[in-house]
Amino acid sequence: MRSLWIFLVIISATACAASEPDWSDVQKDLTALFRELLQTDTQNPPGNEIAACQALKAFFDREGISNRIYEVNDQRANLIARLHGNGSLRAILLAAHTDVVPVDENSWSAPPFSGDLKDGFIYGRGALDDKSMLAVNAMTLALLKRMKAPLRRDIIFLATADEEAGGRLGAGWMLERHRDKLDAAFALNEGGRIILRNGKPLYVAIQTEEKAAYNIKLTAYGSTSHASVPRLDNAISALAKALDRITRYPAVPVLDPVTTAFFKGLESVEPLVELKNCSIYTTEPLYLSMMTNTISPTLIQGGIKSNVHPPSAEVNLNCRLLPGQDVKAFVDSLSSWIAPGPYEFKYTARSSTPEASPQDGIGFILIEQVCSEMFPDTPILPYLSPGMSDGTRFRHEGIPTYGLLPFPLDENEVWRMHGKDERISVEALMMGMRLVYRLVELGGK
């Protein structure tokens, strides 16, 4: 079946390569939309994603593409736009989220909601996560309509709220209420990577599954009294001891079929990875995080006054569990590891992680075909994302979802995501534009 799909994709590629958009005009339109989205403050909390949806609605209205804003409340909203094909094949879903993580403006060299263009880079919170993909997906629908591309599939554009806080008001809300409007043969979402090293493509990672994110609150308790007399049962001291133990919690590597295939394909081009006796040897943090459950302390709180022993102190542990891992068993193991002590763990359980999206599915094959054209001789690999996205919700609903941030990024640039001076080069933005347009044009025929 896979060889048949590849044959059909190649035949279709030959048949539809006749006309190309004017990419210089596309760049002007794309950067204008992208910068408008960056200038729209959608920090979550509070979100205010309705402002981004309104900007997108105005864009689609100008292009004559049917669209609708789905209001969750007066500040939070999602949007669907749809370019209709003849309906003989199931749709393609292009998904991206409108919210961004909060930002410390004082640490940036450019205002984080300015969309400033400097030295070939566009700066702004969300430049990588995820407004660049949002803009490219929207422009893809516009280009297909402008070019009068014959489509057998509908192309669905989905802009979701609340992804950075788990997606309950975004993808979750839409799937619960409007699942029929999102039915698709496959979805393209964020999550994968096109990594450059020394200016050359190192690998393309197509996300087919992702880890599950849990915020686990660890609280340490102690006796409260006047701080002029030190106490051995100080809650903050107890919490510090627990955190010290947690930094030495044994992370046991687990390789599932996706990570096994990823590292086997990566080993030939990545000197930081060695595969020996069915085990992976690496010191690279990203690769290690793909093989183990991880724990990152992110928020800490404790104390009521400078001269009072606090009754409790707590830390938020942002934990990312591998597919198939049981959160209760993980927390029980963590509790045993730091014991004994006056500790309590709290977390919210959720349904188990869905099955990985198939590597022989039409979505994976199309992405593989287009990336092979654009990045010849570069390994194209299935990928377990250490982060969690809306993709998990789509997969739970039976929509095969493939994550690929379609912009070639230097491995050091990736770390700007959620960090200071988040940015993307105009060159990378346009490469992503060409990739997604080519993918959807090819898959839609």
Image: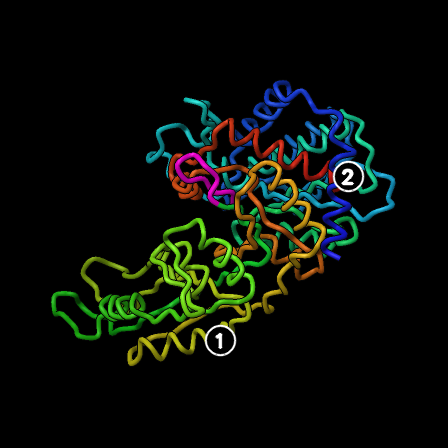
* Image location (x, y in percent) of residue 122: 47, 27
Q: Is residue 178 visible?
A: no
**Residue 12 position by quadrant:** top right
Instruction: Look at label 1 and name its amino acid.
Output: Lys
Circle 2 residue: 12
Judge whether 238 appears above or below 424 on screen.
below
> Which structural element holds mark 2?
helix
Q: CA distance from mark 1 to mark 2?
A: 49 Å
Mark earlier in primary sequence (1, 2): 2
Circle 1 residue: 328
* Image location (x, y in percent) of residue 148: 80, 27
In the image, what residue occupies the spot 66% across and 55% down?
394
Q: Which mark is residue 117?
A: none
Q: In this figure, which colouring scheme has been used for the structure?
A: rainbow
**Residue 53 position by quadrant:** top right
Instruction: Look at label 2 and name its amino acid.
Output: Ser
Quarter of the picture holding the N terminus: bottom right
Closer to us: mark 1 or mark 2? 2
Instruction: Pick the residue in front: 279 or 256.
Output: 279
| First to last magenta residue range | 192-202
Q: Is residue 162 visible?
A: yes
Instruction: Pick the residue in front: 397 or 412.
Output: 412
> Crowding at label 2, few (<14), some or many (≥20) Cα neighbours within 10 Å?
some
